[in-house]
Structure formats: structure tokens, C-alpha cells
Amino acid sequence: MISSLKCMTRWAVLCSSLMAGAAVADCKPAHQFETLTPGVLTVAAWVFPPYSIPGPGNQLSGVDGEIIKRIAARECLEIKATVVDPAAVIQSVIARRADVGIGDWYRTAERGKALGLSAPLYLDVMGIISSEGWSKISELEGKRIGTVQGYLWVDDLKKTFGDNLVLYPNPVAMAQDLASKRIAVGVDSFAVGVASQQKGAYQGQSIKVSEPDPRVKATLEPGQTGFPHTKANTALGLALNENIQALHASGEIAEILGSFGLDKQAADVGAPRLVE
């Protein structure tokens, strides 16, 4: 057995490497499954705080990043992170350039046709951003409203508000128009809004979780998120699911949400379901 006490200065690097190798050798994975590169979990990520925060090298943080790191540790895997555009995350998994993708991905029936979708991680709750502190859909009637493309509530907001709804490619563009008063209110993921405000956006604005309204289904049944993974790799899917269930049971996912300033109750996902 290698003792760190014997690691004198000139042998520090060698001893550290040997100890790390011994630790990997002693690690017993919770499940058996194949990855694209043996011993490595390849993760496709995009920059989307607070869910996906890639860093230099193979560093990952954010809610999804912290969850996938804990799963990799349970399975004795190193992480290799590739940072791509949002659309390329899904394509990377489908094309088998990545084992899994991270970044607040909804569990939808359409995605389920081409991808494996892990057990639910957390709920993505709709938030309303305004200087008045509005939280009801009814309070937005007659106002010019902005939201970001790709969310579950977009189609319902189109039906409800018609031409008063402005679509943006990203939250930054929406925040700029809200600050300049080109729109009166913004609608975004509550968590994304909170994370943006923590970094200086939405000054003087209040961010509220939308109250339930039958006109916007996402306010009644928030979307469940998960990790998209290679559909044919059913053993990987099983390992992801069981690890996620264990992290829910231990309270770790709730703790991770709280560590990023998010509501821990978003970890109460309920029974698995797909958005049709």
C-alpha cells in the first residue's frame, strides 16, 4: 500500500499518480455498461447557467453538471466534456459522439423517438419577470410580453396573447428589451431568471413563479428534465435511472438545486411522464 507519508518532494508527482491509479483500481462501479471510450463518460454540454456551466479542460458545474459528476463517480468513470451549441448537444448523442447530454433538456415524446431519456431530474418551472411583481397570466393581458424560443409554454402563450408575444433566441436578448422597456414583461425559466439576476441582469425586476392557469399547461404541469443518452445503450439508461433515483432518495439533487439558489422543491418530480 502506498502511504502519502512516504511521498517526499522529489517523488510527489510520481506518488500522487500511483495513489490516483490505486484509487481507480479499487473503485467498484455500481453498474456494468459500455461507454464510447472505456473508463470515460463523454458528456455534450452547452453554456446554460445555472444548469450547465462548462469550465476549462473537462470541468463541469451547474445543476446538471454536478449531478452527472456524482453519477460518474459512482460508476468509476472519468468525464470528458465537449462544449457545443444547444442544437449540437442532441445531435452529438444521436450521432454517438457523446454518451449523454446535459443542459435542462425536457423529457418529450418527440425526443424519445430518437434518444434515450433518463429518469426525471427536476421540474423546470415557468417564471414571470416584471417590475410590478406579476405572477398571474391574467395580469399580463394587454401587455407586450417576451419569451425565449424552445420552452414548453411558447405555443400556449402564442394562443393566449397573439401578436403581443415577442420571441427571442436567448434570455440575453429578452433581458435587453425588458431593460429598455420595449417589452413590459418577460417569461423565462424561473431558475434561469434567478441565475441571470444573480449575475446582474434584471435589475429592479421581480421574478415570480407563475400561478396555475389552464390556458398555459406548463403552469399546471411543469416540464420534467432528464439526461438524453444513446438510445441503443439500454444498460447506460438503466444505470442513469437507478443513480438518479438514489440521488433523489438521498436528497442530493435537492441539495444541488439549493446550492445554485433554486427551490429545492423542484426535485419533487412526481411520476415519470413525457411531454406530448
Image: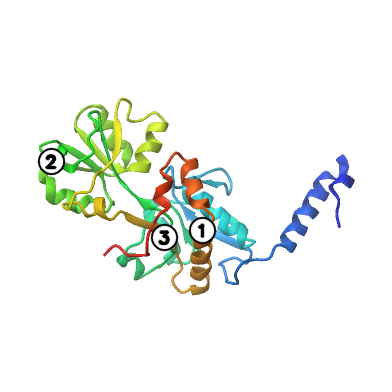
Q: Which mark is residue 120?
A: 3
Are discs 3 and 2 less than 8 Å apart at CB? Answer: no
Badge 2 density bin: few <14, some 14–19, many ≥20, Cα 10 Å: some
Q: Earlier in the sequence, mark 3 or mark 2?
A: 3
Q: Which of marks 1 and 3 precedes in the sequence?
A: 3
Residue 98: in sight, yes or no? no
Asked if one can make out residue 274 in the rendered structure from this viewpoint, the answer is: yes
Question: Marks 3/1: CA distance?
Answer: 13 Å
Q: Which callout, 1 or 2, points to the residue nearer the camera? A: 1
Q: Of circles 3 and 2, which is in front? A: 3
Q: Is residue 89 left or right of residue 2?
A: left
User: Is disc 3 surrounded by few (<14), some (14 to 19) or many (20+) residues within 10 Å?
Assistant: many
Place of residue 90 in the rendered image (x, y in percent of width and height, measured from the top left): 40, 60
Identify residue type, mark 1. Answer: Ala
Residue 180 image-quadrant placement: top left
Q: Residue at x 58, y 58 (%)?
A: 72
Residue that badge 1 annotates: 249
CB within 8 Å, label 1 to label 2: no
Specify the amino acid type for callout 2: Asn
Q: Is residue 207 left or right of residue 132?
A: right
Reading the image, the residue beneath label 2 is 164
